[in-house]
Amino acid sequence: MERLSAEAHLCHGDLDRALTREELIDGVRDVEGLICLLTDQIDAEVLDAAGNLKVVSNYAVGYNNIDVDAATQRNVAVTNTPGVLTDCTADMAWALLMASARRVTEGDRLVRSGQWTGWEPLQMLGAEVTGATIGMVGFGRIAKAMAKRALAFDMRVRYWNRTRLTVAEERELGVEYRALDELLGESDFVSIHVALSDQTRHLIGKPQLEKMKPTATLINTARGAVVDEAALVEALREGKIARAGLDVFEREPTVHPELLTLPNVVLAPHLGSATVQTRTRMGELAIENCLAACRGERPPHLVNPDWTPRQ
């Protein structure tokens, strides 16, 4: 915020809440650069309200909140903040995996309730992580970072991706490719790492969940709508899968009410990139993208390559 104030005429909304639709549309009318959050829906209506707009700089890696085609049609650059949150998000996915497997949050609630009566040989038995099989749905930067963590635990790493790696790349990374259905059936842990698009919305639904092991755990740190939340609730409730760890939700910040009641799911409030260091680096990237486009330069992390710089 200090840097932007020094280098541009800065206006902004309240920092402790998302802008309303009306506030967003009213706030963009005279701006050349817009730095937005993943909670801001930037569509044709917003773009049309901003007649001077040169760039929409998303403070996130994913940009499903922005109508990129509409922006390109209006010659508005769209940018994101890739790379800097890779390890941070992989750490969060790993934390959810461990917490789910070893039932950490269930144990925390038991101790806090005052009902814990001491150690028992069969109390809250979880799933073994070391030596298990993990399946990555999508295999970009974060999934590859997650795979490194998994290999350190002697896990067998399988992946599915729209584009398969070369055999040499698979060998170097210590991973094996599987078709999606095969991966779901083979994995003890399934970790989701795909961007949200029309093709990936509800990629994991009832048919896919039924292919998973009843002892398996689903981890999602990507986007909530990749998973059919109602189908996940049913699978968790009926024991079709054992556990889930979720950092994202289909209709954030609303969470499916039954998820809140299930003991076998760990819920986090979208903390994937939530460290001081990572959020600061994301902000720096968002600023660099925004100011570059406003100067008529090609920003470093351009999402729509057909954009043409303009003064």
Image (spheres, helix red, strand yellow):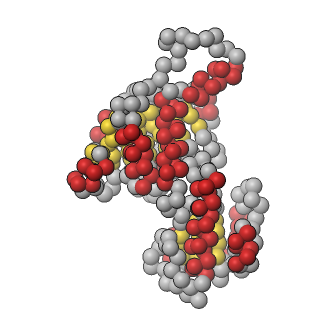
Quadrant location, the N terminus: bottom right
Q: Is residue 45 visible?
A: no
Q: Residue at x 39, y 45 (%)?
A: 148
Quadrant location, the C terminus: bottom right
Nearer to us in this view, 98 or 161: 98
Count the marks. 0
Q: Residue at x 61, y 77 (%)?
A: 291
Q: Residue at x 65, y 83 (%)?
A: 52
Q: Position of residue 73 (x, y in %)?
A: 51, 79
Q: Residue at x 59, y 23 (%)?
A: 107
Nearer to us in this view, 44 or 24: 24
Q: Which residue is outermost to the left? A: 167
On screen, residue 173 above or below 119:
below
Q: Is residue 189 visible?
A: yes
Q: Position of residue 133 (x, y in %)?
A: 34, 35
Q: Which residue is outermost to the bottom? A: 311
Q: Position of residue 135 (x, y in %)?
A: 36, 41
On screen, residue 31 above or below 57:
below
On screen, residue 40 above or below 171:
below
Q: Is residue 250 left or right of residue 173?
A: right
Nearer to us in this view, 285 or 204: 285
Q: Position of residue 298 (x, y in %)?
A: 51, 80
Q: Is residue 8 left or right of residue 248?
A: right
